[in-house]
Image (spheres, rainbow, N blue to C red):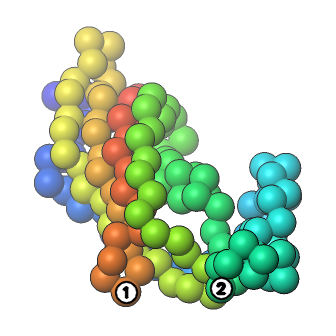
Amino acid sequence: MPNVIAGLQVGEKFEPYVKTFTSVDLFAYGAATWDWAKAHYDAAYAKTMKVENIFVDGQQFGALFAKRVIDRFGPKTFIAKLSIRYRMMVFVDETVTGEGEIVRIDADEDGGARVEIKQRFTKNGAIVSECTILARLRD
């Protein structure tokens, strides 16, 4: 078995992850992505949309899902596919809990591996967002 997948097992869980989204987080994400949608930083504007407050950009969940995989498997990890589904909004100062699990491992012919990971974020026990990632791992 190649080194890159030695010790990995289907069913292996990721460490739980807890994140509270502050207004600084939302602003920084907008700055990093040049996505200046006012609903993510201007509370008065968000209220005109009939929502309670500024809210997390859904794409930010995708970024966090990808980051958790890269943090787990290392900088040579390549995210080959990311499928995401959004279930509910998350507002500023709300907390989500992330969990993940390896659901499939396939060895590559070149000594690496393709690993499928399912992840989700929940808020107060309800699913906020779910994701399936196919990652290619290399030594």
Residue 99 in percent (x, y) is at: 33, 67
Residue at left offset 85%, top offset 50%: 34
User: Which residue is label 1 attached to?
Assistant: 124
Image side of residue 100 versus residue 77, left or right: left
Residue 5 in percent (x, y) is at: 25, 37
* Residue 64 in view of the camera: no
Residue at left offset 32%, top offset 13%: 110
Residue 66 in percent (x, y) is at: 50, 48
Local crowd at mark 2 within 10 Å, few (<14), some, or many (≥20)? few
The answer to which image quadrant residue 87 occupies is: bottom left
Residue 96 in percent (x, y) is at: 46, 78
User: Which residue is label 2 attached to?
Assistant: 52
Residue 2 vs residue 120, the one in the foreground: 120
Q: Which numbered disc, 2 or 1, marks the residue closer to the eye?
A: 2
Image side of residue 31 versus residue 75, left or right: right
Image side of residue 70 versus residue 93, left or right: left
Q: Secondary structure at mark 2?
A: loop
Query: Which of the image's four quarters has the C terminus?
Result: top left
Query: Against 134, is 91 above or below?
Result: below
Q: Amino acid at mark 1?
A: Asn
Q: Secondary structure at mark 1?
A: loop
Question: For the residues marked 2 and 1, what is the alpha-carbon distance in whole angstroms?
Answer: 17 Å
